[in-house]
Image (cartoon, grey):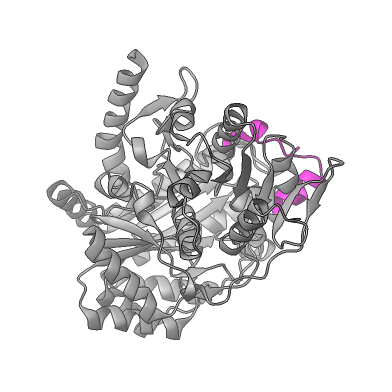
Amino acid sequence: MKKALKDEIVLINHQGLKLSSGIQIQSPSPPIGMAYIGAYLKQNGLDYFGIDACGEALTKIRRIEPGSDLLMQGLSNQEIINKIPKNVKIIGLTSLFSHAWFLVRDLAKEIKINFPNCIIVIGGEHPSAQIKETLQYDFIDYVVVGEGEETFLELIKNLKQKKDVNNLEGIAYKGLDGKIIETPRRKRKTNIDDLPYPDWDSWSINEYIDHSQVSGISLGRGIPILGSRGCPYECTFCSNLDMWTKRFIMRDPTQLVDEMEFMKKKYNVNSFHFMDSTFIVNNKKLISFCKELINRKLNISYQLPAGTRCEAINEELVDVLGKSGLKNLALAPESGSEVIRKIIKKQLNYKHFLKAARLLSKSNITVGCFIVIGFPEDNLKSMLDTYKMIFSLAVIGIDDLTVSQFTPYPGSLYYNELREKGLIHGNLEEASEIVSFYSKRVLSYSEKITSKKLYFFMMSMFSFFYVLSFIIRPWRPIMNIINFLRTRSENARYVRFFSEIFFTRKKWVSNIEEFEQK
């Protein structure tokens, strides 16, 4: 009975995307969202069959189109179809990032053709933000909106018992008349420590670990982890609001370290990359977390690759972060212009940001900064302000800088505003630049800065920061590269870029040639 039940529910992680040229690094990470969903199903008495289209075939690389530098990593759609059990009844897919939506959409279409009686359910940030656009396709039956564990479980139970799903919270679907029905949003789960650990055994976790497929830099044998859910801020270029609302919930520090200790023993890992939208919010809980790590002497390292806040950072926190094993984090000032920061609702105290940057630069933690240029309100004055900030960061001693060109991300306030103005039409095929924030082809949405000038500003900001940084501290990149060649540990993003250009992409190209010959 358990085997039959397992074959009836199938969860699928889509393929990964990579770029074979340019300065962007695409590294698909283990599907932590699917691993949580799967674990929650098992905790509540339902088994499932997992297909990791990326993790099961990390060495399979194909071009999306002939001559394209955009590559697909993993199983083909037909290979995925072949793995689906014949008596499947419900298939769950996820689309966390909009740039990968076309992979999920095309896969869902193929599944429906081959299994016309199965029910296809899609969740994640993209469908949560683009409900109507997702349900325009007849081969998609339901959208799980926002946090998915409880909603997906209840949906499965109702479907199996043939009950009316209209009373379920957090779903969207087409009614008999073809109109889209959206039920009320489900309230966020407040005690996320009740959730089971991610069910990594169903998601090729050892393959990801062995191939160093991580978000951020490679610090060794690494595995993803979540220390919190949500973000209390509402930046106008971010899609977080539709997925998580503004509620930020951090896990209990002791239970978080319990998971790290468990995963270290089970999978023989020595590093963790936090997948949080922003982890540094609650100073007291963070200090408790760090002290718990220090006291247990786990001898692990960890990183915070997503742009985090600086408000909670002080001397005490920086000290315990370094002692607890934090090796890398990224701050996200976004712009050097106070005017732009107010428009995008960044809510950043610039003086405190620089103070936090100075404290971190004096520690053993490598620090990066995220900057976005080309907002609709950007102009030459705001570009100059950003150059000034970059100069300050280089002098302070920040290790890395990432400058990306603004694109209206589905689910963000900017996206909705630009769509209302008719500047975009909600068609992701026409917004292919969402795959890469660093391409010459990215469209400028600023009235004052052309696309050509925007690309120039981006590349010159990169050059300005790294040339100045290397002049001030010439020993740092030399030592970091030597350390990488000796240990293969990437302790800065420019080291990861070095690794990508001279090692990783050569393997991709050889794999592309191999599979294209077959």
Magenta stretch?
414-433
In the displayed image of the protein, which residue is found farthest to the right? Answer: 177
Rendered image quadrant of residue 176: top right
Q: Is residue 416 magenta?
A: yes
Q: How many marks?
A: 0
For the stretch drawn in magenta, the main secondary structure is helix
Q: Which residue lies furthest to the top in this view?
A: 517
Q: Position of residue 232 (x, y in %)?
A: 60, 72
Whole-percent x and y of residue 143? Answer: 67, 49
Q: Residue 186 at x, y = what percent?
A: 68, 66
Taking depth in this image into account, of 405 and 412 the one nearest to the observer is: 412
Residue 383 percent across, percent down from the top left: 57, 52
Magenta span includes 283? no
Asked whether the viewer can see residue 13, the reply is yes
Question: Could you tell me which residue is drawn at 57 percent across and 68 percent down?
Answer: 231
Please tell me in which quadrant of the rendered image residue 295 appears. Answer: bottom left
Residue 376 makes an appearance in the image:
no
Is 269 positioned to the left or the right of 455 in the image? Answer: left
Which residue: 32% across, 53% down?
Answer: 217
Could you tell me which quadrant the C terminus lies in? top left
Relative to the observer, which residue lies in front, 115 or 476? 115
